[in-house]
Image: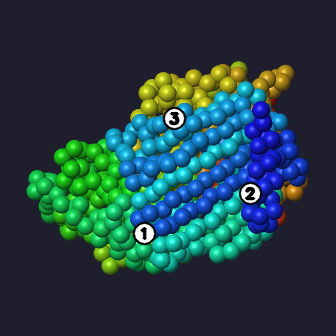
Amino acid sequence: MVSPLSRKVNIFSCFFFLSFFSFSQTPDNYIALLAPEDLMTKVNAIVRYDNQRIEINAIDDMVVHTKRIVSIYNKYGDKHANSLEFYSDNSSIKTIEARIYDSAGNEIKKIKKNDFTDNSAVSGGTLYSDSRIKYYDYTPISYPYTIEFISEVRHNTTAFIPQWRPVTGYFLGIEHAEYKIENHSGIPLKIKKENIDNNQVVEVSENHFTIKNLPGVNYESYSPSLVTFTPNVKPALTKFNMNGVEGVNTNWKDFGKWVYGELLTGTDILPQSAIDDVKALTEGVEDKIERAKIVYKYMQDKTRYISVQIGIGGWKPMLADDVNTLGYGDCKGLTNYTKALLEAVDVPSYYTLVFGGRNILDIDDEFSSAQGNHAILCVPNDGENIFLECTSQTNPFGFSAGFTDDRVVLLVKPEGGEIVRTKRYEADESIQNTIANIIMDDTGGFTADVNVKTTGFQYSLHEGIENKTERDQHNYYKNYWDNINNITIENIDIVNDKDTVILSENVKLSATNYASKSGDRLIFQPNMFNRVTTIPSRYIDRKLEFKIDRSFKDTDEFIIQLPQGLKVEAMTDAKEIKSQFGTYSFKIETLENNKLKYTRTYILLKGNYPKEDYKAFRDFRKQIVKNDKSKIVLIKA
């Protein structure tokens, strides 16, 4: 009997002489131990062969062919198996299969179409959706192993042509990756190429790209997103079909006009009862922003978020009437509903497409296409845009920090799309102010009343604590102040002022043996409640630039009542540090009645920095960690 590997050798021999540019895989691709030696260093997996071919046959007919062979060397590489395909009512999986090979290239398992798990492609929080996924989750017996995946998917929509992003993670080598679009539709195809130079990409012909022997990228602290420096090819047709609805996409204005006309028009009709409600609530309120605040609160109190992934490509919102009746909707439906409510009280607003998430990701303002994963609402106000997050029942009006802040978005207007940027929160707008009154005892323990006030991005990090159970709140503060051993949380009072967007956390606590004893002396660190404890990793030869996503400012003031009979013998001198990355300062002052005052300010500035500056940034943080450990020595008076 001829082994699978032998058959592959024979097939390879037949095809080798056909064309130098055939790009067919070789038998060695199935043998994990025969990957190119220069790709084996510090990788979890290597893409041995990846071929994605996209046929665009008509405005409503696209077929995506995929063949991928990946050698996986440890548990961290399992995620790169990627043995999955998505489908929906507007796409169908014609072929899907996989094979598993051991380290020597012997086939050990064949996975047929019926062996793949078929599930909804969205989370349990989704009410209904036509998006589904077929996947195979292989549990390896040993490493390394190789997996081959083959699929063919036919799509009735051409609005979402797959991009080429061959580097899908850190510590992933690429032996051969290939991407080709065959456009038979007669419709012009737009292509944007990013990070092609210096990444071993060869443009074989128009819309045909390959990579050979690209080493894996090592993760480095504060690295920018992979998509900003790894190869990426973005395609889009200038005319497209999205689930039966044709659109024009020559620029963002045209695309936005299509969204407004085909996806939004006719979805904003409200029942008269809802119109009467908001008109009654805003009666006599002249200022449009005040009216908008009242309507936003009405929407928050009346609805809740549930994901609904149906409609035209999952892009068309539910009818405003349905949201009003049912009391729920997804980001599209709730945004559209809020827009309709505002229109009822003469407040103009614009449906807005955005990439939402903690990490900041822009809609590409230079390349119009179906982009974004979230919808928000823009309320223009005298040259300033106020953005509303309509999926949250708790968000303050106009607050976007942490999820949709500081990024390029698309406003959808009747006359067309407009590119703008959401609010950027500067350091003075993202403040954490910690004030503490501390009473120490002569055994090294203390009691303290601590108040932490946060605004801006820092508010987004703390908001929601008030909704936790008492037990979870206690655990939260014990972890938050994990530098304090033997801590007991005695009382918690949290006030969330949504008008000023200030979260105030008032915590009463105590601890034993915080100060260490050395003979007749007590030694303690006065920065009890806001320390920087981590130093960024050191790199002898850093490869990547680094990025600080957001600015912030910490201010601290601790009043420390010393025990009777003890006085200060020694304490660390004041320190001030200035750098291009921010500033840091602290000082300790003696007050009357045997008290000390510790004050500290730390400002970190957003920015993209060259790799050559990383050592200076690390030194800046290293000095902060050192000074946050400053000490005071007490001795008997």
Q: Look at the numbered discs 1 and 2 and tell me whether their residues touch, using CB distance below 8 Å.
A: no
Q: Mark 1 highlights which residue?
A: 59
Left or right: 163 as drawn, with respect to 49: left
Q: Position of residue 602 (x, y in %)?
A: 66, 53
Left or right: 534 as drawn, with respect to 181: right
Q: Look at the numbered discs 1 and 3 and tell me whether their residues touch, using CB distance below 8 Å.
A: no
Disc 2 marks a residue whose amino acid type is Ser
Q: Position of residue 554 (x, y in %)?
A: 60, 51
For image coordinates 40% across by 75% down, the residue present is 248
Q: Position of residue 339 (x, y in %)?
A: 27, 62
Q: Mark 2 highlights which residue?
A: 24
Q: Quadrant of residue 3?
A: top right
Label 3 sits on a secondary structure element that is helix
**Structural crowding at the residue carrying mark 2, measured as other residues with C-alpha within 10 Å and reported as few (<14), some (14–19) or many (≥20):** some
User: Which circle's residue, 1 or 2, is located before the other in the chain?
Assistant: 2
Disc 1 marks a residue whose amino acid type is Ile
**Mark 1 or 3, which is nearer the eye?**
3
Q: Give the number of the disc on residue 114.
A: 3
